[in-house]
Amino acid sequence: MMLWLFAQLALAADPIEVPMDLQGHPAMHMTWKFFAAGLTEREPKLTYRHQFKQTVYEPYLDRSGVRIFLMAAMAAEKARNPAQARRLILDQFAYVEGFVAAHSDRYAMASTPAQAREILVETDKMVVIHSIEGGHLLLEQPEDAAYWRRQGVALITLMHLRDDELGGSAILPMRVGPLINRVGARNRRKGRDRGLTEAGADAIRQVTAAGILVDLSHMTRQTVDDALAVTAEVGTTPVVTHGKLASLRESEMAMNDSQVLEVYRQGGLFALGLAADSLDVLGFAAPDGVCPGTVESWAHHFDAVVSLVGDDEPVGWSSDWNGWISHSAPVYGKKRCRDLADLPDPLLVDTLGLAHPGLIPDYFERLSRMDVDLKPVMASSERFLQMWEGVQRRSGL
């Protein structure tokens, strides 16, 4: 865990390079009642198979080593009108803010990059930042983006799981995808345009003018191309909080190499989710010796991104804790890829997989022991802060 711990000791230096989680959902239960409450409630079962289950248990989060956490609110698939959408987001914000206030010795909210830097340098607290996943019904009026900026939102993921008024959303793989995104499946079947709409382009302009970053995750490739044209036009830096490479995985959610390179040409940041099974090679020859759905899959995909963009560029990660997903399975153990007896000095993540936030240090220690260069990971926090500063500067804030 030396690299992880070293990051905690180097905060006084500039740039700031600390563990950063670009997206999680600790208040998912505020929108979807079947999720157990996160953060302060009961301890979750120790398993990486936790789809739809609570995982953001505060004692584990406190052990994660994460110093910047974008806690994302979500309403896109639940809300039926703008008023309901706004209320659902505000309820989630209130839950997160209440938690931070109740644990102010270990957590602090930041609504500006200057606040985030000050907290990181002067304290050992986790910096909590508001974000939103899914702009559906939330950016209806020209003043809406400025409203979300006043609530402290740093980033908005424009699309989520369904084609909507803003553009085309990548259809999830397997049978569930077309069922969730029926409009998108019908439009795809009929060969209709599934790019960014005029409303979506206006939303990017308004969000940028308000000093908020735009996340291109969940977009169709056509929507990504259209969105990158708009971000270039307005001079903002695009973010991809949970992406994947089309060169490794046949999926609407995967981005072409040229799109990833354009994100970086515009000064942006690309990140991978920690759900390793969604990063497994699909539709191409699987790599030899890589245990599917595990930290090894994540490492293979990460190395491919670094090779594409260059090892001097940052590459981030996001957990999606309390999202819809499970996380990386263990490589070692009974009925796994390799026998635990073959592993000297095993880590807990080797037998449990990525079961909860407290195993994040183990996860990245395992990557380090696999000779994965984690410097691009640690550099992602400074890149994010610079991007946030840039969009706020352009907005006049």
Image (spheres, rainbow, N blue to C red):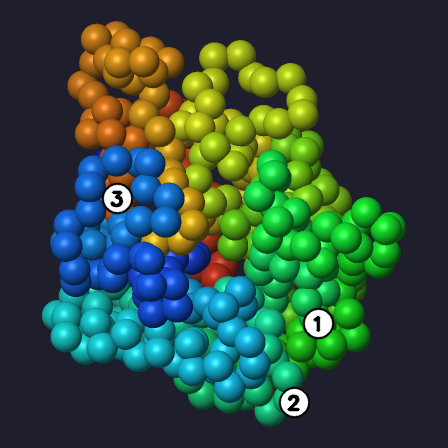
**30 or 273: nearer the viewer:** 30
Residue at numbered disc 1: 165
Residue 269 is situated, as x and y percent measured from the top left of the image, at 56, 54
Earlier in the chain: of badge 2 and badge 3, it is 2
Identify the residue at horizontal 40%, vertical 28% (top origin): 294
Q: Which mark is residue 356?
A: 3
Spatial CA span between label 2 and label 3: 40 Å
Q: Secondary structure at mark 3?
A: loop
Identify the residue at horizontal 63%, vertical 59% (top origin): 162
Q: Nearer the viewer, mark 1 or mark 3?
A: 1
Q: Is residue 78 left or right of residue 57?
A: right
Residue at numbered disc 2: 142
**194 or 266: nearer the viewer:** 194
Spatial CA span between label 2 and label 1: 15 Å
Q: Is residue 162 left or right of residue 20?
A: right
Residue 146 is situated, as x and y percent measured from the top left of the image, at 54, 88
Label 1 Cα neighbours within 10 Å, binned few <14 / some 14-19 / many ≥20:
some
Q: Amino acid at mark 2?
A: Pro
Earlier in the chain: of badge 1 and badge 3, it is 1
Q: Amino acid at mark 1?
A: Glu
Task: Determine if residue 282 is in view.
Answer: yes
Task: Determine if residue 216 is in view.
Answer: no
Residue 196 is situated, as x and y percent measured from the top left of the image, at 76, 65
370 over 313 or under it: above or below: above
Spatial CA span between label 1 and label 3: 35 Å
Q: Amino acid at mark 3?
A: His
Earlier in the chain: of badge 2 and badge 1, it is 2
Identify the residue at horizontal 20%, vertical 29% (top origin): 348
Label 2 Cα neighbours within 10 Å, binned few <14 / some 14-19 / many ≥20:
few
